[in-house]
Image (cartoon, rainbow, N blue to C red):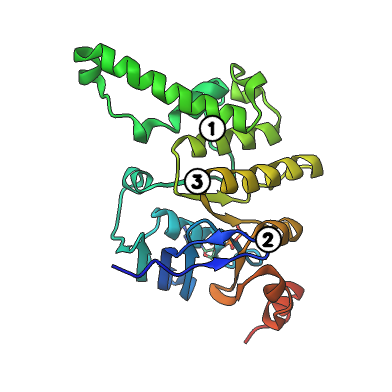
Amino acid sequence: MKDMSEGYVTADGRQIGGVLMEMKNITLRFGGVVAIKDISFDIRDGEIRAIIGPNGAGKSSMLNVISGFYVPTEGEVWFKGVRRGPMKPYQVARLGVARTFQNIALFDGMTVLDNIMTGRLTRMKAGLLSQALWYGAAEREEIAHREKVERIIDFLEIQNIRKTPVGRLPYGLKKRVELARALAAEPKLLLLDEPMAGMNVEEKEDMSRFILDLNDEFGTTIVLIEHDMGVVMDLSDRVVVMDYGRKIGDGPPEEVRNNQDVIDAYLGVAHD
Ligand SMILES: Nc1ncnc2c1ncn2[C@@H]1O[C@H](COP(=O)(O)OP(=O)(O)OP(=O)(O)O)[C@@H](O)[C@H]1O
């Protein structure tokens, strides 16, 4: 077991805990393409960690390694002090990892409420047989799940659309429902793939507020990929910068912003 005791205090006075997840020398290849080259970093309990980089840098690939969707070609992933082997998505979900997607992945024909309930599936104990045999227990479980979901609906201020089919909602609200569904799994680690993509300024402000509030209220650790630099600088405690599959920067936003390699990558300086 790893020592998880160390932590740090953020510029705004939040106490960040020890290492929740550690990526050790991760390399990921797709045939001849090397999407990630020997990258190491950690994610600490309670922090908001961003992964940034130009198009094709390897950010989505890295998020997929963190989520367990991809198994790295080389390197180790440690979660809660234990080395993680290859896992099925539901096993990763049970460990407490949930995510949202770059292209919203909701059921358009279902209501907001039912979409969010699908986020509780990995937490449901009562299977079909036990539901038939122990109807009372299953009903109690269902009520408990609904209470959790209602709390999330209140938290994300979407009470007025709870019965609306998702397909009828504007883009920004769909993104919020997707966040609600991920939260319904009560994740320890929440992965957000471009949570602000395609949003207007007001929607971005709302989403930023919800991300900060949920980190504060539920203590959820967050990893996000985001192209909007203003958002990244405002929200994150520490930032990993990727370029051509390599890590070229890692630290608090102000440190990363002044890193010459990062400036060069964003200005498109030639690489050898
Ligand atoms: N499934 C795959 N099969 C083959 N190559 C892939 C696959 N996924 C990603 N790649 C390649 O790996 C590299 C990194 O891609 P990735 O999507 O992780 O970058 P990214 O930083 O998320 O880019 P973007 O900001 O454009 O989403 C690219 O060269 C990409 O073409």
Q: CA distance from mark 1 to mark 2?
A: 35 Å
x and y percent of residue 60 in the render?
54, 58
- In this view, 166 is above or below 203: above
Q: Amino acid at mark 2?
A: Asp
Taking the image in four quarters, ligand 1 sits in the one at: bottom right
Q: Which residue is mark 3?
A: 99
Q: Where residue 106 is drawn, which disc sits there?
A: 1
Q: Earlier in the sequence, mark 3 or mark 2?
A: 2
Q: Nearer the viewer, mark 3 or mark 1?
A: 3
Disc 3, SS: strand
Q: Is residue 2 above or below residue 199?
A: below
Of circles 1 and 2, the one toward us is 2
Mark 3 Cα shell of 10 Å, populated few (<14), some (14-19), many (≥20): many
What numbered label is drawn on residue 12? 2
Q: Position of residue 114 (x, y in %)?
A: 49, 22
User: Mark 2: few, some, or many residues within 10 Å (few <14, many ≥20)?
Assistant: few
Q: Nearer the viewer, residue 219 or 233?
A: 219
Hey, what amino acid is under mark 1? Answer: Leu
Kind of residue at disc 3: Arg
Residues under numbered marks 1 and 2 in contact, where contact means CB atoms less than 8 Å apart? no
Q: Say left or right for 148 vs 126.
A: right
Image quadrant of residue 80? bottom left
Horizontal arrangement in the rendering, residue 1 relative to residue 234 (left or right): left
Q: Quadrant of the N terminus?
A: bottom left
Q: How far, Cα to Cα, is label 3 from label 2?
A: 26 Å
The reply to whether callout 3 and callout 1 are in contact (CB within 8 Å) is no
